[in-house]
Image: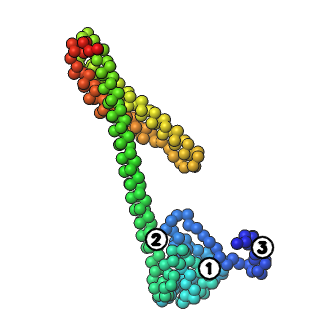
Amino acid sequence: MAVIPYTKLQKMLGINYLSNIMISAEEAGKASDVAKDIVPVLRSRHKLESAPKPSTSAGLGLGGLQGATMSGGTPDDFTVKTQASEALTKGLNTSVAAFILANMPQMDQVNMQEMSGTLNRAGQTMTALLAAIATISLIVGGIGIMNIMLVSVTERTREIGIRRAVGARSYDVLMQFLVEAVTLGLAGGVLGIILGFLASFTITHTLQWDATVSPTAVALAFGIAAATGVFFGFYPARRASKLNPIDALRFE
């Protein structure tokens, strides 16, 4: 392949036109509409007469159907084709190809709907996978909080007995350990939020992706962290509140 300025090539070949122009659509599924819009522009620049109308047995000039029979006006001296139309009409006779080309907009719409459905299904699958991973992480973290609180209750049994002996109620002991469990959960939530902001910043500046952390996600993370602390910390806290003060004072 030799790449040179097109003006230089035109001088070398003694021509003043372009043999091929490749155009890409900004949005998927719009190729047929773009091809239709190109036809009147080229006819105007080529100074052709009013746009010809395809006969019932002819194609539309899309898909590379050379020599299509036209009625009325000057025939096109160019061919506009899309990759989809070229692939669909390859090897077909004129009448079948014309029928396919006439329905290209509807086919593009169907393809767009299929693409949208595929992307939605893929997004739902990824959301389900991420939710499953997050659920497993929460369960593991919650079990860790429960184990830490159970160890804390065992090590502070004598302290609990002293508190109960001087007038603390079971509810007071329950709330004390429940608050500690929630604090552990919130500490993990804050750490996760900080890591999320750092990951978002890194991805944005490294991969040039627009990754942001919304305030809703932050609030949801705080709420889930607190709920995890309450759920998994309730059993240790209740166990501490149910200790017999006399047995707790005797504990060594």
Amino acid carrying mark 3 in the image: Lys
Mark 2 = which residue? 108
> At 41% from the left edge and 52% from the top edge, which residue is drawn?
126
How far across and how far down the image is residue 83, in percent? 54, 74
**Numbered disc 3: secondary structure:** helix
Mark 3 = which residue? 8
Image quadrant where residue 170 sits: top left
Q: Is residue 144 above or below residue 19?
A: above
For marks 2 and 3 on the same chain, the one whose residue lies earlier in the sequence: 3
**Numbered disc 1: secondary structure:** helix
> At 59% from the left edge and 81% from the top edge, which residue is drawn?
79
Amino acid carrying mark 2 in the image: Asp
Q: Mark 1, mark 2: which one is toward the viewer?
A: 2
For disc 1, the neighbor class at 10 Å (few under 14, some 14 to 19, many from 20) is: some
How far across and how far down the image is residue 3, in percent? 72, 70
> At 28% from the left edge and 17% from the top edge, which residue is drawn?
157
Q: Is residue 14 above or below residue 129?
A: below
Residue 24 is left or right of residue 134, and the answer is right
**Numbered disc 2: secondary structure:** helix
- CA–CA distance between discs 2 and 3? 38 Å
- CA–CA distance between discs 1 and 2? 25 Å
Image quadrant where residue 5 sits: bottom right
For disc 2, the neighbor class at 10 Å (few under 14, some 14 to 19, many from 20) is: some
Mark 1 = which residue? 43
Amino acid carrying mark 1 in the image: Arg
For disc 3, the neighbor class at 10 Å (few under 14, some 14 to 19, many from 20) is: few
Q: Quadrant of the N terminus?
A: bottom right
Q: Quadrant of the C terminus?
A: top left
For marks 1 and 2 on the same chain, the one whose residue lies earlier in the sequence: 1
